[in-house]
Amino acid sequence: MIDFHSHLDLYPNALSLLPQVAKQNIFTLVVSTSPRAWLATSRVFAGYSNIKVALGLHPEIAVAKAAEMDLLVSLVAQAEFIGEIGLDGSPRFKHSLALQRRILDVVLAECERVGGRVMSLHSRGAADQVLDALEAHPKAGTPVLHWFSGTKKQLRRAVDQGAWFSVGPSMVASEKGRQLVAEMPAANVLLETDGPFATKADGTPWFPWETVHAVQTLCGLWKMPVEQVRGQLVSNLKTIVPGLLTTGGIE
């Protein structure tokens, strides 16, 4: 399957998981939490054409990693994908929103300068602010809003701005999540796990190949048979990551 938002480097047994992830998934996007983490993970995960590491600075650690902002910007030109970036306005992190927004703005501006990137974005509790930032940088690339949890009005605004969405088993387990996914254009949806942070009912993390557990729910929401849903998701991936067609990542 596809996992377009995984923290694979943060699983305790990440190195032993790599071959299995590469075998079972046609594509996995490993998002990083800081520029230095991206540098290290990119080296360790090299050699798998269908596993890509995205350059990021997670908004939850904006204060702790603010000194890496210049490094982040300097690496954008080298990175195929950007993520995890964005804003977090939840009670625990809203105190740093101004700093988070400065970091997001400089990254989006650099993405514009280098011709645009596919970006995996965090928007919890700050959907409008993230959309404002994207609106201010219209040539930054293709935004993929991961585990979107805003309102339906904010969702419609995101769709109007051309945003994509990554959804996973934990998101579609909730009624609100299912309602939001039902409103998303099927052609703009990808799968994710957000593992190891997103977990199953027993507390164990979702593994990158387990995005398949969201497919049956999508069948009901989209009123499509399972093979059509799978085909739609692969088609979406080919659209957003066309280079995979020439690297052997998609059969």
Image: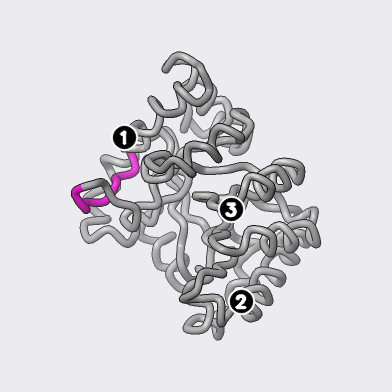
Q: In this view, does 100 lie above or below 209?
A: below
| Res 65 seen here | yes
Disc 2 vs disc 1: Cβ atoms closer than 8 Å? no
Residue at x-position 19% and y-position 49%: 202
Rate crowding at label 2 as few (under 14), some (14 to 19) or many (20 or more) other CA atoms within 10 Å. many
* Residue identifier under label 3: 150
Asked where in the image residue 182 lies, by quadrant, the reply is top right
Q: Main secondary structure of the magenta part?
A: loop
Residue at x-position 60% and y-position 48%: 144
Residue 145 position in % (x across, y down): 58, 50
Number of residue marks:
3
Asked where in the image residue 121 lies, by quadrant, the reply is bottom right
What SS does tag 1 mark?
helix
Q: Which of marks 2 and 1 is nearer the N terminus?
A: 1
* Residue identifier under label 2: 97
Rate crowding at label 1 as few (under 14), some (14 to 19) or many (20 or more) other CA atoms within 10 Å. few
Residue 101 position in % (x across, y down): 66, 73
